[in-house]
Amino acid sequence: MSPSPAPSPADLAHAPGPVTLAGGSHPDDVEADVPAPPARTLLVWDAPNMDMSLGSLLGARPTSAFRPRFDAVGRWLLGLAGPEGLAEATVFTNVVPGSTEIVRPWVEALRNVGFAVFAKPKTAEDSDVDDDMLAHIAARNAEGGLEHVVVASGDGRAFREPLEALVEQGIRVTVIGFREYAAFAVASEVVGFLDLEDIEGVFREPLPRVSLDTLPPGGAWLQPLRSLRSLLDR
């Protein structure tokens, strides 16, 4: 299993220091008052899966109007955690060799908003970030205080069972994504689901989400997912 992202500066600033006791007493001799960790709301964002789902939804590469605004996601997460809670926002992504200069501005923008980014080279088809996301969730759970886990992904194969196990431990779990591609969460009786478009301000314009499940009474066109000319490239 791949390592978790390095601790953020905020983590290091609040890391507990050594226990110092008056009179040089050994820590085992006195019951120290160790404060309980703050209630943590953790967001893990599966960038490859979310990008693929959005592209499939639009039938094309998203323009700026249809790219999610992470500042809006961050404000939503802070509201979810509450004034006394700790909100941690993380994005997990793959970096294809040769695409560094394209990805760098996006990564820096995320970090400037307050997100930690775990980036991993895309060296093979199976070098995804699912295990890294699960490892980070497990690490935060082991630290204590994990109250709410929010997963941005529609990948039920990777996340359904681990998330259901968290619910059994009493941890609240919410999946955010697109209802068209997160069937495991939409149908779940234990895991909550919130469509990304329902978070205020995430998209500048409404997504063109006409599907067989949402047809208007007068009918609607379903645009091709690829150019007809692509048939000549096969």
Image: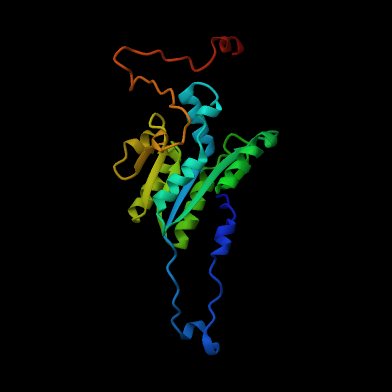
| Residue positioned 51% across, 47% down in the render | 133
Q: Residue 160 in the image: x percent, y percent?
A: 39, 42
Q: Residue 186 in the image: x percent, y percent?
A: 34, 36
| Residue positioned 61% across, 13% down in the render | 233
- Residue 35 vertical position relative to residue 96 in the rendered view, above or below: below
- Residue 143 vertical position relative to residue 198 in the rendered view, above or below: below
Residue 122 in view (yes/no): no
Q: Residue 93 in the image: x percent, y percent?
A: 57, 40
Quadrant location of residue 182?
Answer: top left
- Residue 37 vertical position relative to residue 200 in the rendered view, above or below: below
Quadrant location of residue 228?
Answer: top right
Answer with left or right where residue 79 lies relative to residue 136: left
Quadrant location of residue 190?
Answer: top left
Q: How is the image coloured?
A: rainbow
| Residue positioned 43% across, 27% down in the render | 206
**Location of the C terminus (image quadrant):** top right
| Residue positioned 31% across, 36% down in the render | 187
Q: Between 184 and 104, which is closer to the camera in this rendering?
A: 104
Q: Residue 35 in the image: x percent, y percent?
A: 44, 71
- Residue 150 vertical position relative to residue 226 in the rendered view, above or below: below
Task: Tell how many labels.
Answer: 0
